[in-house]
Image (cartoon, rainbow, N blue to C red):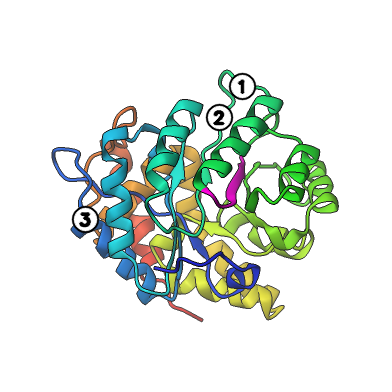
Amino acid sequence: MQTTAIQPEQFRSSVLAVPPLARDASEKICPGENAKIIRYLEDGGVSMLLYGGNANLYHIRPSEFHSLLEMLEQSAGKDTIVIPSAGPAYGTMMDQADVLKKFQFPTVMVLPTKAIMTEAGLMTGFRRFVETIGKPAVLYIKEEGYISPEGAAELVRDGLVSFIKYAIVRKDTADDVFLEKLVSLVDPKLICSGIGEQPALIHLTKFRLTGYTSGCVCINPALSQRMLKAIHDKDYDLAESIRRTFLPLEGLRNEINPIRVLHEAVALCDISQTGRHLPLLSGISTTAVDRVRTVAKELRNAPIP
């Protein structure tokens, strides 16, 4: 596992995968099945992993956080970047910060929440978390009202942010006043597109963001890697063609639930047995299983152009 700070150029060589977290029948974290996902991603050319929402770290038991970090540290290849997440509640993230100090992850993402918070309070909590772990953290901007572009820029200027994961969904990706303001205040090299393949082409071209995160990369990592290369090679027709290949599974994720569908898709196309969801989530309906299996297998078997 890479332990040194992440460099912006690394986002040009690897998609930032956001995998599910495999659990066994008793809902315990399963090292063997998680290792399968990691090996599959690494074999497909991915060298950056982020464990956050898709891993349902919102609801992880505090008592299993240390073993999760140990498992991730031991399972990743020597050159693979692994980013765990903390929070979203202030008390949770600060207790997790004490655990994180014992490990050498290059950075940690703070999970976002709009429940019982103010922007000023968030910024204070983010500062305290970074001071405790002793390294900059990932700022995850998922929706309006969490933090302003000006607030994010202040945290960046103060050296508290390793990079920003930008994931506010827009009806028209190209029409984003918030992101326009953000890239005017923060170097786009420090901002990663955080909503998968679908907005990545526009985010990386019009707004000049540094790279993109993906959940569906877990199904066909080599194809998502090819899209990233096509964008940087300015082969936009190829990038658009690959983007459309990911659309059916992303469509089901948007229709049903992004976390739940990806968790099931990884298992339904035989990459890893991800197990049951940790409550407060639940599995997809039996009527949705066949639909997810079909599009997941089609995506896994899609050729690499």
Residue 31's disc number = 3
In the image, what residue type sits under mark 1?
Answer: Met
Q: How far from the left and from the top, in percent, is residue 217?
A: 45, 62
**Neighbour tally class for label 1: few under 14, some 14-19, many 20 plus, Cα within 10 Å:** few
- Where residue 12 sits, quadrant-wise, is bottom right
Amino acid found under the numbered disc labelled 3: Pro
Q: Secondary structure at mark 3?
A: helix
132 part of magenta stretch: no
Whichever of callouts 1 and 3 sits on the residue coming sooner in the sequence is 3
Query: At x 38% / y 49%, what residue is drawn?
Result: 262
What percent of the width, then of the height, locates residue 266?
31, 55
Whole-percent x, y for residue 96 in the image: 41, 38
What stretch of residues is rendered in magenta? 134-142
Q: Secondary structure at mark 2?
A: loop
Kindly identify which residue carries mark 2.
Answer: 113
Q: Quadrant of residue 112?
A: top right
Pick out the residue farthest to the top.
116
In the image, what residue occupies the spot 38% across and 72% down? Answer: 42
Q: Are marks 2 and 1 in contact (CB under 8 Å)?
A: yes
Q: On the image, numbered disc 1 is attached to which residue?
A: 117
Q: Residue furthest left?
A: 25
